[in-house]
Structure formats: C-alpha cells, structure tokens
Amino acid sequence: MRRQLELFFTALMFYTRVPCPRWIGHSEELLNKSTVYFPLIGWLVGGVAALSFGALRVIFPTDISLVLSMVASIWMTGAFHEDGFADMCDGFGGGWTQQRILDIMKDSRLGTYGATGLGLMLALKFFALKSLVTGPGVSVWAGPGLLVVAHALSRATALTFVYTHHYVRANEDSKAKPLAKQISLPELLVGLVFGLLPLLAYVAWLGSGWPLLVLLPLWLVKAYLARFFQRWIGGYTGDCLGATQQVAEVVIYLFFCSRLWIST
C-alpha cells in the first residue's frame, strides 16, 4: 500500500503543482512506474475545474466562470500539457526532418505555430464547454461532470502511446526522459481502468449507454496521431503526449456538443 501511495504522489508531483509529502522520492524508476496513475490525476484536475465552475457560477456569469475554471485547471498542472501542444505545433509546423522537429520542440521559445495552435485550442475548448453548460435541456451538472470524464479519458488516450510506441528522445535535457521506458500490459490496463471509470459513472448517472460512443473518436485520434508521429519522428516525445491529451480532451467536448445539438 505504501508503495502505491508513493507512486501516486510521484505522479501527482510530476504532473501537477499540488504539494506532496517530503518523504516522496525523485528516482527515475518511481517516476516511470507512476505513469499508470496519469489518468487518475485527471480525476483531480477535472474535479478542481468542475468544482471551480460550480462555485464561481454562483457569483459570476457563465462565461467568466468557465474561463476561471480553465485557469484553475491550467494552474494546477502548470500548463504542462498546453506547453506540450504548443511545442508540437511549433515542431511539426516548422520542421521538415526528424532532428529539426525534435530540436524545435525542445526550444523553450514559443513560435507562431505554437501561439496560433494554443490560442485556437483554448478558444475551441471554451466554446465547446459553453455549449455543454448552456445548451437547451442540459442538466446543471452535465457539463461539470464531463470535465472529470474528459480529463481522465484524454490522459488515458495519451498513456496508450507509452505502451504502443517508442520514445524517440533519449538525451539528458529532455523534459520527459523518465517516461521513455514502455509500461507493461497490466500497467496499461490499470491506467485504462482509471480513465474509463468516470465515463462509466457518467453513463450510470444518465441511465443511457450512448456516451460510450465517445471511445470511437478517441480511437480515431490515437490512430491518426500515432501514424503522424511515427511517420515524422519515428515515435513519440513528452510534448506529443501533452498534445495528445489536449486534442483528446477537446474531441470529447466536441463529441458531447454534437450529441447535444443532434438530440435537440
């Protein structure tokens, strides 16, 4: 039990800014093994965003509450995944060879592709969430509940890369070097369970199985990005994982927006 707590707090320390007990170590082995808890971290980040929105909506208009809830989730992770998405946009937008793409993604400066991509991603996320919480016939908890679902499932989608693909950057200055080793099938399955549980709870709450169809577009996202990353750089990097999480999260919101408006 102590071992699993240590792994969970290691994941919490690496993927968020939440303070952790001082007895938690910093070894590469612990960090690599803690990857299985990546989707579980999504429960916490999504929960903070949902609770922030619910509390702030009492005081502020919906638009302001949504923006502040996004700020809360970004602050909690230190913009970890948003940074990865922006770096990916810069790398694949400005590079035409594997080494050039990797060099650009490693650069801490934000380029035109990254700024444009991140701005559009955040705008799309905001308007999708706004549709989910203000659409006709929408339950007051439907939108906030989906935040937990989306944060967990999107991280589970990114986690699959660690099992199925090769980590291509092995130099010491890589931000995600401890994630380079592949996880085992049992570890992947545990991570997927953590990612799926909020969705299953959401299905039980709605009393309908149609939300399970969101797994199809997520599979398409993984298949497309896997082929794209493999073609250009021969695998994935930490930035690719962050980008996958962001794309998958937005795709989940768009799926539920589509289902919402189709049904009205």
Image: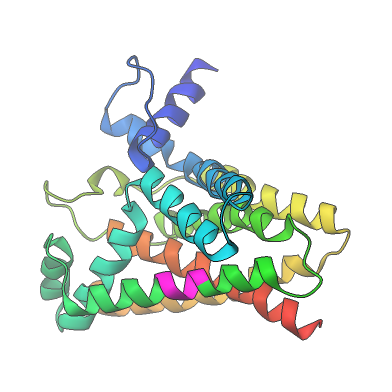
Q: Is residue 229 visible?
A: no
Q: Position of residue 222 (x, y in %)?
A: 49, 70
So how many labels did they put on this image?
Answer: 0
Q: Position of residue 239 (x, y in %)?
A: 29, 61
Q: Is residue 125 left or right of residue 253?
A: left
Specify whether residue 180 is painted magenta.
Answer: no
Which picture quadrant has residue 136?
bottom right
Report the residue at 38% width, 30% height from top.
Answer: 10
Front-lying residue, 168 or 237: 237
Q: Is residue 76 above or below residue 147?
A: above
Q: Is residue 200 visible?
A: yes
Q: Is residue 23 above or below residue 149?
A: above
Q: Position of residue 217 (x, y in %)?
A: 60, 75
Q: Is residue 226 above or below residue 23?
A: below
Instruction: Look at the image and name its color scheme.
Output: rainbow
In magenta, the rendered stretch is 122-126
Q: Is residue 194 left or right of residue 102?
A: right
Which picture quadrant has residue 240?
bottom left
Front-lying residue, 132 or 174: 132
Q: Is residue 172 left or right of residue 187?
A: left
Magenta span: predominant SS is helix
Report the residue at 47% width, 60% height from top.
Answer: 67
Front-lying residue, 118 or 31: 118
